[in-house]
Image (tube, helix red, strand yellow):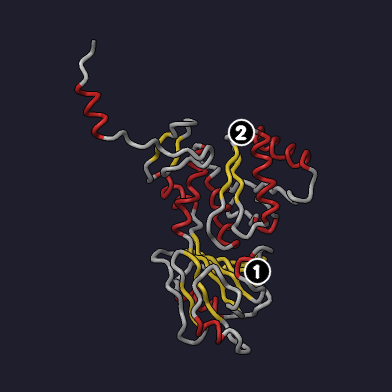
Amino acid sequence: MTSADMALPAQDERTVPAAVLRGLDQRPLDDALTELYALVEQYGYVVVVCSPATPEPVLRRLHTLRSLLESDRVAFFRPELPPLAVAVLARQLRQLASCDLSPGVLASAGRLLTHYLHAGAVLGSVARLDRVPVGLKAHAKSWVPGSQFAVLAHPEPQLVRVGPDATLKGPEFSTWMLVAKGSLQSEWVGGLGTAWNVHGLRETPLPAESPVWWGTGRMTEFCGYLADLSVLYQLVTSVRQTRCHWCGLDVIGDRCVFCSATPPAPEPAASRAALEQRTPV
């Protein structure tokens, strides 16, 4: 992780502790390089998880460090999710890190697990929200004092004005809900948890990057997620694995997270037929 407030407390006793690369854009380059090199030497492979709201100087420093290390054992994972959901996803990967998964499978599992997250927020204003489509009527109502809006950013964008009958489409499977309260006080999220039939609600401090992502600090962010390690493990291991043709790691999906290689394009049928018809000399 690139900030301590994105490293959520362990979900269970098996959850691997998070390594936090603090202040990358403010520290001397040599210090940051030494820290990342030590992590690679200790664990073999490192997956750096950060949100779309991570400051650009931090991202540039990460790419500089990876280039200086000249290593394919460092991967960057920056899913298109709100900060709280990114923190939840990082913790799920930390849970899976205690299992018998190869580095490539573990790193690429993040893309799979994003499909099982339901991430949103209750906002006091949507005037600066640009991550989810906002209609002109919602923009106008955003200026009315006391207005609140419930927004689901993932997996399917939704926006409703908070009211007694307002709700958001939730998961079709049972989840837990993590809630991070900002300066906006709202009891509506508790009712949403009941409507989603969650196992329970847990609270955590609001990530510092959340106001940047949502366009306002007047908010309460929430995320529905799978917490059981056995369920996460079953999801990951039930997906077909392939071997990266470039670095040789087992991966899930069509792109290696570490070396960024994709499967080679299939040979055109005409070329294959021509080769098959050639007579050896």
| Label total for image | 2
Q: Residue at x 49, y 87 (%)?
A: 164
Which residue matches tag 1?
211
Which residue matches tag 2?
71
Query: Relative to 49, does residue 256 appear above or below in the rendering?
Result: above
Are dots 2 and 1 in contact, CB under 8 Å?
Answer: no
Q: Residue at x 23, y 13 (%)?
A: 280
Task: Tell which of 226 and 130 is nearer to you.
Answer: 130
Where does the image place residue 126, in percent across and percent down from the top left?
A: 58, 77
Task: Tell which of 256 and 47 is nearer to you.
Answer: 256
Residue 101 makes an appearance in the image? no
Q: Circle 1: is it few (<14), some (14-19), or many (20+) Cα within 10 Å? A: some
**Label at residue 167:** none
Query: Relative to 129, does residue 136 appear above or below in the rendering?
Result: below
Q: Quadrant of the C terminus?
A: top left
Q: Is residue 56 left or right of residue 268?
A: right
Where does the image place residue 165, in percent across and percent down from the top left?
A: 45, 85
Badge 2 marks a residue whose secondary structure is: loop
What kind of residue is marked 2?
Ser
Q: Residue at x 69, y 49 (%)?
A: 20
Task: Tell which of 43 and 124 is nearer to you.
Answer: 124
